[in-house]
Image (cartoon, rainbow, N blue to C red):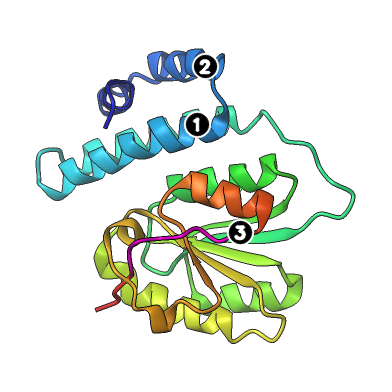
Amino acid sequence: MNNQSKELAELFLAGNEKQALHTVQAYLQNHTKNELYQHILTPAMYWIGELWEKNIITVADEHLATAICDYVVSVTEMRKGEQTPEQKKVMVLGPEGEDHYIGLKMVASLFKENGWEVRYLGPNLPLGAAIETANRWKPDAIALSAALVYRLPVLKKYTEAFRALDFKPSVILGGRAVAMANWPASESEGVLIVKELDQLKNWIQTGKEPDNEFDISFG
């Protein structure tokens, strides 16, 4: 993690909303939102997650940091991308039991910035509700993520259900748990595994899948 990410993480943990926003706005003067999410916010939140898992910070600390990060992401989201006449559509969600949502908001923002119509359904969405919405809206892609490794079996259940939909949307998996785990090749057909936001951006803009040197194991 670079110094800018650590500095921002410390501002989140301190509850310093004003300075955190100032730092992000200063960064955006010379960088894109994708660079902000990829190189600053994501490493900062991953580090905070590690601190919480190691009991170095409390759950209250983690919630405070998440709230400040959410505010920063929401403000930067106001810088919209251009819409295209024939927009592709994407659903963005977290599976049931998964309460982390900052990564989902970054993904939704990246799709919007590249002209997609986004239906952000948030974290902790029951599978039945997700399937019902997908069948009604028929998105071109469905993006979901998990922050904690023990959520991977649930992620697999959702992935299999989305792959079985008759209109065959692309299924995109990301999040800290996905980046840290392994996925057998037999499970990867029809699924885009995203370790970094740059890989997702490349897929959105070119349709080319990333060459990942890792697999995901659902245990």
Is residue 152 in the magenta section? no
Residue 73, image x, y percentages: 51, 33
Give the number of the mark in front: 1 or 3. 3
State whether residue 198 is above or below residue 90: above
Identified by mark 2, the residue type is Gln
Q: Please give the name of the residue rendered at 25% of the width and 24% of the height, measured from the top-left corner.
A: 10
Q: Which mark is residue 71?
A: none
- Assign a secondary structure to mark 1: helix
Disc 3, disc 2: CB below 8 Å? no
Q: Mostly what secondary structure, the magenta segment?
A: loop
Neighbor class of circle 3 (other Cα within 10 Å; few <14, some 14-19, many 20+) is few
Magenta part of the chain = 208-215
Residue at 74 percent of width and 72 percent of height: 138
Q: Quadrant of residue 44?
A: top left
**Residue 180: percent from left, percent from top:** 27, 58
Reading the image, the residue beneath label 2 is 25
Q: Which residue occupies the foreground of this view, 34 or 10? A: 34
The one of 140 and 57 positioned closer to us in this rendering: 140
**Marks 1 and 3, how far apart in space?**
20 Å
Q: Which amino acid lies under the numbered mark 3 shown in the image of this protein?
A: Lys
Q: Secondary structure at mark 2?
A: helix
Res. 2 in view:
yes
Q: Tell me which label, 1 or 2, sits earlier in the chain.
A: 2
Looking at the rendered structure, which numbered label has been put on residue 35?
1
Q: With respect to residue 1, does 105 lie above or below?
A: below
Total numbered labels placed on residues in the image = 3
Q: Label 3 belongs to which residue?
A: 208
| N-term mark: 3 or 2 | 2
Name the amino acid type tagged 1.
Glu
Which percent across, then down, holds residue 186? 41, 84
Q: Is residue 24 left or right of residue 128?
A: left
